[in-house]
Amino acid sequence: SGQLFAAAESGLYRLDAADGSSTLIGPWGDSPTVEALAFDPSGELFMSADGGVYVVDSLTADRTLLSTPTPRAEGLAFAGGRLLAIGVTGQQWALYSVDRITGALTELYPIDLIAPQDGAIVDFISMDTDASRQGLNIFVARFTVIGLPPSASLTLDRLDLLSREIEPVADFTVAPSIPFATGSAGTAPSAATPIDVPTVDLLGLLLFAILLVGAAFGILWTRRP
């Protein structure tokens, strides 16, 4: 219907696409961590949050839990007449179909390109149907925890649902202080602060040795009969 929706821990919102203002449709009450939202062609809203797959009333924000699948649905999108999800088991990401009645996930095929590399962790995944409706635009945020300052990257890939091939579209390295969809990577220090460590030269060592000898002599002197 041309309306834009968003979900936060506080509740479901309707957004004004012109100025970004938001209107609360309804609060959740339990502060869930929302992973994804997706409308089907009929206007029914699905949501994954805290490991569960829900149907959401877009007028009241009332939720109905369908399932708590393993793995959890990290992203949701409708394409090819199916509700699709991305999930991870260990370090292996895969595309799943979601049963719109029971919420159960069925694995379709693995997606290797999403797997984190070089000490990175996947912070969030978002996806939607591309213009051809035979592919998915997959948006992945990674946060690399190795190194100082840490780094964050955002990648956009296109998954062809017919050939099962992934085509990299764009890759951005961004400041880790940029907020991600499910939180913030934090702010890294601009530069490490140098610390001056005092060093001891040869003369210092000689004076230190003399002090030790003097202290030992003093102890022996006080203990003499």
Image (cartoon, rainbow, N blue to C red):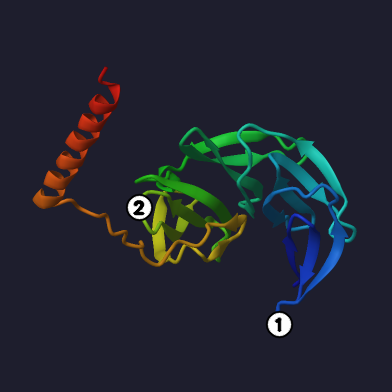
Between circles 1 and 2, the one closer to the viewer is 2
Asked if residue 197 is positioned above or below residue 65 in the image, the reply reads: below
What residue is rendered at 65% in x and 47% in y? 82
Q: Bin the neighbour count of mark 2 within 10 Å (Cα to Cα): few under 14, some 14-19, many 20 and up.
A: few
Report the side of 59 relative to 225 (left or right). right
Residue furthest out toward the right? 60
219 with respect to 11 (left or right): left
The amino acid on which the numbered mark 1 sits, given as a three-letter code, is Ala
* Towards the viewer: 100 or 17: 17
Whether the residues at callouts 1 and 2 have beta carbons within 8 Å, the answer is no
Q: Which residue is drawn at 17% across and 34% down?
A: 213
Locate residue 134: give its quadrant.
bottom right
Furthest residue toward bottom: 18
Asked whether the viewer can see residue 178, the reply is: yes
Cα distance between the residues tagged 1 and 2: 40 Å
Q: Is mark 2 on a helix, strand or loop?
A: loop
Residue extending farthest to the front is 225
Residue 80 is situated, as x and y percent measured from the top left of the image, at 61, 51
Q: Residue at 88%, 61% (x, y): give it.
A: 59
Say which of 164 and 74 sits in front.
Answer: 74
Residue 161 seen in the current view: no
Q: Position of residue 211 (x, y in %)?
A: 20, 41
**Residue occupying image coordinates x 24% and y 27%:** 221
Residue with the mark numbered 2 = 147
Quadrant location of the C terminus in the rendered image:
top left
Q: Which of marks 1 and 2 is nearer the N terminus?
A: 1
**Three-letter amino acid code at the position of disc 2:** Gly
Task: Give the labeled residue for mark 1.
Answer: 18
Q: In this view, does 104 lie above or below 21?
A: above
Q: Tag 1, which secondary structure?
A: loop
Label 1 Cα neighbours within 10 Å, binned few <14 / some 14-19 / many ≥20 = few
